[in-house]
Image (spheres, rainbow, N blue to C red):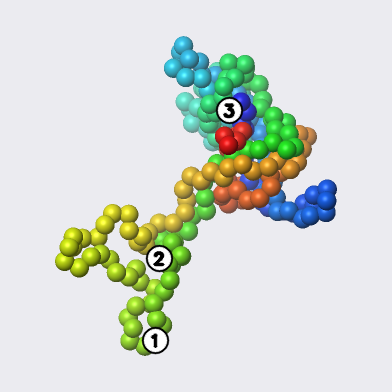
Amino acid sequence: MKKAILGKKLGMSQMFTEDGAMIAVTVIQAGPCPVTQVKTLDRDGYEAVQVAFSPIREKLCTKPMKGHFQKAGVAPHRYVRELKLENASSYEVGKNITADVFEKGDRVDVTAISKGKGFQGVIKRYGQGRGRMTHGSRYHRRVGSMGACSYPGEVFKHKNLPGHMGSVRVTVQNLAVVRVDAERNLIVLKGAIPGAKGCLCTIRETVK
């Protein structure tokens, strides 16, 4: 991976292609992301670039992070993440990574935290069918048979059961970059990405 950037999901919209087809797009505010630290193979055992995103007031930053930002000569930011780049040694501390690292036609992978749905049953969580809704059936939206009869007489692991749904790390691969607005730090991608409006997302060069 040679290029990546942090961004914030602004929402979805529509665009028309050159042949007149309407497509759904996602607008992301990408960067600017100042470099706060460069990890080297000799000192840290691996190569990576540590970047920050979304400036905040100094009083909202913890004292250790405040010192870290001061050492890098960067204003306090809300998010700090590492990007493992092949050309990490070419980056300088204090320099900004902006949206123009990508261009129209590039293919990217986007990682974000999906929307949380809370505690849900198996019908919504896994798409299972429901039972008869007649009087006295006593089986409407329940799980169903839980296991075997006499042998092995237990419920197997990984059975689909009710539980917490959503709010997990999700990556959508091979999305096309439709437009890049470097002046307003915007990247427009074809299709949808995980997460709610305003969530942090990582845009990377695709691996496939």
Farthest residue to the bottom: give it: 135
Residue 51 in sight in this render: no
Q: Earlier in the sequence, mark 1 or mark 3?
A: 3
Quadrant location of the C terminus?
A: top right
**Which residue is tagged 3?**
1
- How many numbered marks are there? 3
* Neighbourhood count class around disc 3 (C-alpha, 10 Å): few under 14, some 14–19, many 20 upward: few
Kindly report the distance in space between the C-alpha atoms of the residues bearing marks 1 and 3.
57 Å
Left or right? Give the position of 33 relative to 153.
right
Give neighbour class at mark 2: few <14, some 14-19, many 20+ (Cα, 10 Å).
some
User: Which residue extends farthest left?
Assistant: 150
- Looking at the image, is 124 positioned above or below residue 167? below
Residue type at mark 1 is Thr
Which residue position is annotated with label 1?
A: 134
| Mark 2–mark 3 CB contact (< 8 Å) | no
* Left or right placement of residue 145 versus residue 42 in this view: left
Image position of 119 with respect to 52: above or below = below
Dot 1 crowding, Cα within 10 Å, few <14, some 14–19, many 20+: few
As helix, strand or loop, the secondary structure at mark 1 comes to: loop
Q: Position of residue 202 (x, y in %)?
A: 58, 37
Q: Identify the residue under disc 2.
A: 121
Image quarter of residue 7: top right
On screen, 15 above or below 121?
Answer: above
